[in-house]
Image: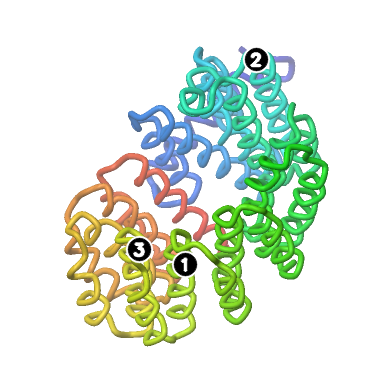
Amino acid sequence: MLVAGGALTPPVRDTVAGAFADLACRWSPDRPACLIEEAKGAALQVENPFARADAVALIVQALLADASRMDGALTARSRTFIDGAVASATAVAEIHDRIVTVLPLAHALTEAGHEQGAVLFQSLIQTVEEQGPGNSPAAALMGPESAKSEMLARIAQAQAISGDIAGARQTAISQSTQLWRVKTFAGIAEALARYGKPDQAAGFAVDAAAALKDLRDPGAADAAAGEVAGVLAAAGLVSEALALAAEPTDMVTRSFAHMAVARALADAGRLAEADEAFGRIEDTRPRGMALWSLAKARARHGDLEGAEALLEDIRMPLARNQATADIAGFQAAAGDLQGALDRIADLPPEFHRGRGLRIIVESLIYAGQLAEADEVLAGLGDDSLRHGLTGRMVAARAETGDVPLALAMARAAEDPRTRAEALLTVAAAMQGRN
């Protein structure tokens, strides 16, 4: 049990350290390290295996961040948890389920600079290339070969947003067909733009356009043009996007390509250019989706009247409902909560309680109007919608410094995944202020 000089051996030392940590958390449970331990317990209670994998990955992320704030070294307890998480994920028998379980862990480890992340990514790529996509839902729709390429595209996106840009590019290049190289580059560009990395997104958008030029199948090239044009527009390469959208010979395909450009420009707040792209849509079917984005963009910039005028031209009920909910969110954030609630009152009941109220609460939280968000949130009842919004509210409370209320809300969450994520949010906020 003891080595020369009376020192404890590493296993005993780690056990003693863990016991002292448990005792310390009993006396002072609200310290960040103790909240992470509490979140561990909640994460392991999540019944859905994929939701549990996501929650466990967040724990791993928190443990690695905590170590980097200290001396960079993981505690024995943290190492044990991470090793156990990796072992459990990689032991899943069915290929698709294993990939979905391992992906969030690989992302968390890679983002933290941990070498095991790249190892996990490469293991997933090798598994897919050698054994296929398993029982992937895409396999039933696309067939095994296309589903295999789709899975590799998802892995490439995860590599990119976690910081492994070189690995993501190599995965895209390794795709077995030129069409999937195009789609993978475009998907990476879209993912990076969504995660707030516009410069890297622009590079992959250019890669997608270059790969598209080498695609020899005219029909496939026309079909992929809209996807590539959209990411070019999102990256700010507007003239290139418009030129590409105009290339398809089929009027419907060309219209959908211009729709993708119009939506990307509207989402970026480039309204005049979005209007120009919208004006090039020749077919009536894609106009509704474009109008939804245009209406949302106008509402975001305070032009509620202009947004309402566009609603009248949307013929697709779903797109019109989506746009109505989005406009209500911006209206609430601008200070007119009652007007926003009145706006969504006539939506279909399931849509009203789903997207409509969620958008309003999220917009209020984003605008810092937490009392108003609480008012709406309190009326939602205890359901899946409330669970998701509770996490956002906890984050907002913690960011404003109201840690006691944020912590009380986190611990009151009945859904274990929500509780785990909320506890980690509070711990991160506390550590950020120290």
**Image point 74% across, 26% down: which residue?**
176
Let me know if residue 193 appears in the view: yes
Observer-side mark, 2 or 3, equals 3
Disc 2 marks a residue whose amino acid type is Leu
**Image point 40% across, 43% down: which residue?**
420
Q: Nearer the viewer, residue 188 or 358?
A: 188
Query: Which of marks 3 and 1 precedes in the sequence?
Result: 3
Secondary structure beneath dot 2 equals loop
The part of the image, by quadrant, that contains residue 151 is top right
Indicate left or right for 166 with 221 as reference. Answer: right
Residue carrying label 2: 2
Query: Which of marks 2 and 1 precedes in the sequence?
Result: 2
The part of the image, by quadrant, that contains residue 193 is bottom right
**Image point 79% across, 44% down: which residue?**
211
Residue carrying label 1: 399
Residue 314 in percent (x, y) is at 36, 69
Query: Which of marks 3 and 2 precedes in the sequence?
Result: 2
Whether residue 376 is situated above or below residue 7 in the rendered picture: below
Let me know if residue 80 appears in the view: no
Residue 348 in percent (x, y) is at 19, 60
Spatial separation of the CA atoms under disc 2 and disc 3: 67 Å
Q: Mark 1 and 3 residues: CB-CB less than 8 Å, in contact?
A: no
Disc 1 marks a residue whose amino acid type is Glu
Residue 312 in percent (x, y) is at 33, 76
Whether residue 58 is situated above or below residue 200 in the rendered picture: above
Indicate left or right for 3 with 373 as reference. Answer: right
Q: Nearer the viewer, residue 275 or 30?
A: 275
Residue carrying label 3: 322
